Amino acid sequence: MLNHPCIICLVRPPRRLLFAAGLAAAIAACGGGTQPLGPTPLDQGVVVFMNSGYRGTSQQVGADVADLRKAEGPCSADENGTGSWDDCISSIRVLPGWSARLYGDKNFRGAVLEVTEDIADLSSLRGDCSGSYNDCISSIRVSKNQ
Ligand SMILES: [Ca+2]
Ligand SMILES: [Ca+2]
């Protein structure tokens, strides 16, 4: 799995790669389609849920995800039955020692929500992401607290 060339779409590449022409080629090579996230060690990152109250399908996220549309998940299934995590997350648990930034748009853009503790219902937080952050998050950064 980790040897799959498309993993570069799901994890943030080393900074030097951001400026390399090779990155564009790598993204192009990935084309459409989704890939599962992880695997992630159980004590790292955050766990996102498709429903509020930590219910429904969940996914641990232990590395930055620039485009949740490319992350295999339970929402917005296309004609092939393949869904993603884009505009899907409704609650989130933060593992001890970690925090996250949730973005309304892909590539870490748009409305941003700093998350340092569990949030049982993202619709309870007003924001610039279609009124609240529920079913709106499209990219995630996770970081280990200093
Ligand atoms: Ca949802
Ligand atoms: Ca979005």
Image (spheres, rainbow, N blue to C red):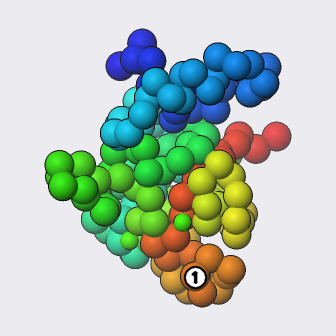
Please determine whether, in this image, residue 104 is positioned above or below residue 94. Answer: below
What residue do we see at 61% from left, 61% from top?
105
Question: How busy is the neighbourhood of tag 1: few (under 14 within 10 Å), some, or many (20 plus)?
Answer: few
Q: Quadrant of ligand 1?
A: bottom left
What residue do we see at 35% from left, 52% from top?
84
What residue do we see at 45% from left, 18% from top?
5
Rendered location of residue 40, percent (x, y): 46, 32
Horizontal side, residue 82 vs residue 127: left or right: left
Q: Which residue is mark 1?
A: 130
Q: Is mark 1 within 8 Å of ligand 2?
A: yes
Question: What secondary structure is marked by label 1?
Answer: loop
What residue do we see at 31% from left, 62% from top?
75
Rendered location of residue 62, percent (x, y): 54, 38
Q: Depth check: give the residue in front, 83 or 49.
A: 83
Q: Depth check: give the residue in front, 33 or 117.
A: 33
Determine the residue located farthest toward the right in the rendered image: 146
Rendered location of residue 26, percent (x, y): 54, 22
| Residue 30 found in image quarter | top left
Whether residue 96 is visible to the viewer of this picture, yes or no, is: no
Whether residue 83 is visible to the viewer of this picture, yes or no, is: yes
Quadrant containing the N terminus is top left
Rendered location of residue 130, percent (x, y): 57, 82
